[in-house]
Every structure is written in C-alpha cells, then in structure tokens.
Image (spheres, grey):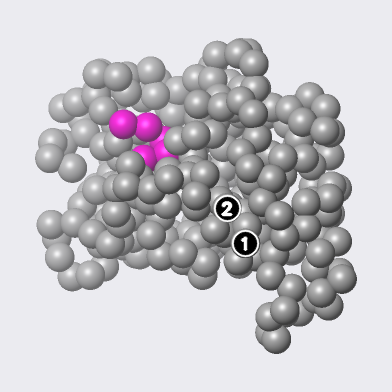
Amino acid sequence: MTSEPRLLLDTSLPPGRMVASDDGSEDNQALWLSDGPATPGLWALIRAEHARSGLWPLLLDSQDPDDGEFRPWSSGEVSPERMSSPGAHDPAGLLAQWWGEYTVTDDGDDVLPPAERAAVTAPFGPRWPGLAPARPAGPDPDEEAAEHAEFFVSLRPHVRLGLVPAASGADALAVAGWEGPANYENDTAKFSAVLRTWEQRFGARVVALGFDTLHLSIAVPPTRPEDALPIAAEHFAFCPDNIWQGSRTHTLASYAERLVDAHSWEFWWD
C-alpha cells in the first residue's frame, strides 16, 4: 500500500498498522489491520468511499481470537508476493478443471467408494454442467453487503477491520495474499477470478475472511431448487469441503436446497 489509509479516507479509522508478509520482507505490505475490533457500520462507511479511495474493506476473523496472535493477520501469514493476477485466469476453465479433479472416482486414496462419490455430485456425476446463468437484476449488491457486514459484526464482535488497495472484493483476496484455500490451491488469484464472475452474475460481495473461511453477501440468490443446483455445482468445484464435510449436507442436491433465497454464502477449506 503506497499511502497511509487515513490519508485516503474521510472516514475516521481506529488505531491500526500495516501487515507485512512473513517472508521477511517489509516491502510486501498489502494489508492494513486495525488493532482492535471493528465497530458496527464501519465496513459500510469505507465501502461507500471505495470508488475514490481504492481501498476495499474486509472484516477479518481469526483462527483463534483468544490466542493473542490473531492469525493469520497479525502474524503475517499472508503471501501477496506469491499471487498472480486474477485477470490471468479463465474462471469457467478453472471451475471445469477443479470439478474434474474432485469428481474422480478411481483415486486409490479416495475416502468414499466410487458409487457413493458419484452420488455426491448427482445428477451431474463427473460431467461438468457449465456455468450457472446470471440471475436477474435485484437489490443493490452494496446495500445487501452493508447489511450483511453489520450482521457479521454482531455475530463475531471480535473481528477486526482490514483495508486492501484493490479494485473489488474479489481482487482483494489476491492482493492481500490470503492463503485460506492453500490445501487445494496456492494461488488465491484463481479464486479471485471466479469471484469476479459471481460479483457480476449474483451480485456477490466479499465481506469477510477468516484463516480458511470466506464470507460473501449475495444480492440475487436462486429462488428455486432447479436454479440453485448448477450454482451448487460451482460451489463444489470452488470449495468441495462445503459439501464433503458440511455438517448438514453431503450431496449436491441437499446443498443446493440451502442456497435457495440465501443472501450469504460461506466457504471453508479444510
């Protein structure tokens, strides 16, 4: 970040500091982090200034808020220097590739028998169904995001404010060097590329990040199970643990039911 955030914003910021990558270089500082919890309404105020400031606000959660480190943020477990550009990747191609990898049924290390593995992604099986159609225009995505941010702070009052110089919430993941999906893919820019299309097709906005979690607001969710199913397929390709290890859903069809009229999406990578 080339300028002190306070110089770019009209909104008053709480005390905070720049976070450097733990690679040992102080040059890799792409994230500003508040020292204490984010106050209600702060996310929305800074988001409203984004077009002028270029700073995208994130509500940042920790793996263990009580451990004193507030990982991965205070501990510098971010790697902006390792991330490529989201624009260098084709989101449709990425999702098709990941779908093919995660629906393979002849892997000797697979924890599920082939028949059960195929049932998880029925009715599509190993065949990638393609991108889900864009949803019709609906509520203002930024207003929806502001409401979700307020709700998120009420649920997790320990979350801190992060500021990232990025064109969008999708890009902020890569710019900040977030490593949440590292067990699946080390280049977070690939996930940013997919999020760009979700911003366009579903009015998605990146509101919050945790150690290995991602929280989005959704302005125009599917309203019928048949519309939700191809979106669920994208979620599986994007984050298979949502279905494989979901506490309430272990099939694409049951997961799709949860997406109907849902104005927030959450992802967790084991």
Residue at left offset 64%, top offset 22%: 135
Q: Quadrant of the C terminus?
A: bottom right
Judge by depth and name the residue closer to the eye, 186 or 119: 119
The stretch drawn in magenta includes residue 75: no
For label 1, the crowd category at 10 Å Cα-Cα, with few meaning under 14, some 14 to 19 and many 20 or more, is some
For label 2, the crowd category at 10 Å Cα-Cα, with few meaning under 14, some 14 to 19 and many 20 or more, is some
Q: Position of residue 227 (x, y in %)?
A: 77, 31
Above-or-below relation of 1 to 138 = below
Residue at left offset 48%, top offset 59%: 180
Above-or-below relation of 107 to 84 = below
Judge by depth and name the residue closer to the eye, 65 or 133: 133
Instruction: Identify the amino acid type marked 2.
Output: Ala
Is residue 19 toward the left or the right of residue 245 in the image?
A: left
Q: Position of residue 182 (x, y in %)?
A: 46, 66
Q: Position of residue 88 (x, y in %)?
A: 32, 47
Q: Which residues are magenta?
A: 167-171
Mark 2 highlights which residue?
96
Mark 1 highlights which residue?
100
Which dot marks residue 112? none
Q: Judging from the image, what secondary structure is the residue with disc 2 in?
A: helix
Above-or-below relation of 244 to 156 = below
Q: Quadrant of the N terminus?
A: top left
Is residue 14 toward the left or the right of residue 155 in the image?
A: left
